[in-house]
């Protein structure tokens, strides 16, 4: 049976990821000049802009990138209520993380035409939303493997 607490829990996770990532991006853009220094630690706070998908793939097709991002975010939003109603707690947390991270990066793509990244690991730069999407995917997969309906 669906409980309002489950919906609020999921929506709260999605909203927290979205807001935290947007606040981080705003601060990184504000201090971009000081963050662009050539600092080389393994994990670093930096500033980068991504006009495509991961690793700038598709940057020469901005309409495709925005459309695909919007479609993926819409799919996560459409899955939210059914997953919260019948999914495991891991699936609920997972789809909530996917939704919050996906919406944050999609908002950047739609509003700014590019995604702000700020967590450098090696040669690749990520943002909180990227980590939320990855963690959400892993939780959805783990929840699916452990959910009773997955075996039947």
Image (cartoon, rainbow, N blue to C red):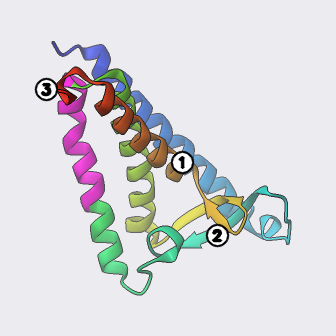
At 49% from the left and 71% from the top, the residue drawn is 114
Which residue is under mark 1? 131
Would residue 144 be found to the left or right of residue 48 on screen? left
- Regarding mark 3 in the picture, which secondary structure is present there? loop
Expressed as whole percent of the image width and height from the top left, the position of residue 113 reads 44, 73
Residue 63 pos. (x, y %): 31, 79
In the image, which is nearer the foreground, mark 1 or mark 2? 1
Dominant SS in magenta: helix
Residue under circle 3? 152
Structural distance between the alpha carbons of marks 1 and 2: 16 Å
Q: Which residue is mark 2?
A: 48
Badge 1: residue crowd in 10 Å (few <14, some 14–19, many ≥20): some
Determine the residue located farthest toward the bottom in the rendered image. 60
What residue range appears in magenta? 71-86
> Label 2, label 3: how many angstroms apart (C-alpha)?
46 Å
Return the disc, 2 or 3, that comes first in the chain's sequence: 2
Q: Secondary structure at mark 1?
A: helix
């Amino acid at each position: 049976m669906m409980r309002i607490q489950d919906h609020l829990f999921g929506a709260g996770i999605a909203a927290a990821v979205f807001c935290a990532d947007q606040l981080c991006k705003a601060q990184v853009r504000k201090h971009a000049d000081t963050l662009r220094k050539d600092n080389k630690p393994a994990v670093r706070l930096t500033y980068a802009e991504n006009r495509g998908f991961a690793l700038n793939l598709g940057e020469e097709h901005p309409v495709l990138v925005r459309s695909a991002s919007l479609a993926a975010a819409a799919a996560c939003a459409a899955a939210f209520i059914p997953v919260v109603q019948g999914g495991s707690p891991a699936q609920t947390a997972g789809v909530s993380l996917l939704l919050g991270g996906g919406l944050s990066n999609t908002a950047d793509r739609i509003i700014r035409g590019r995604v702000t990244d700020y967590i450098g690991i090696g040669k690749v730069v990520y943002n909180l939303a990227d980590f939320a999407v990855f963690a959400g995917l892993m939780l959805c997969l783990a929840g699916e493997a452990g959910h009773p309906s997955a075996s039947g």
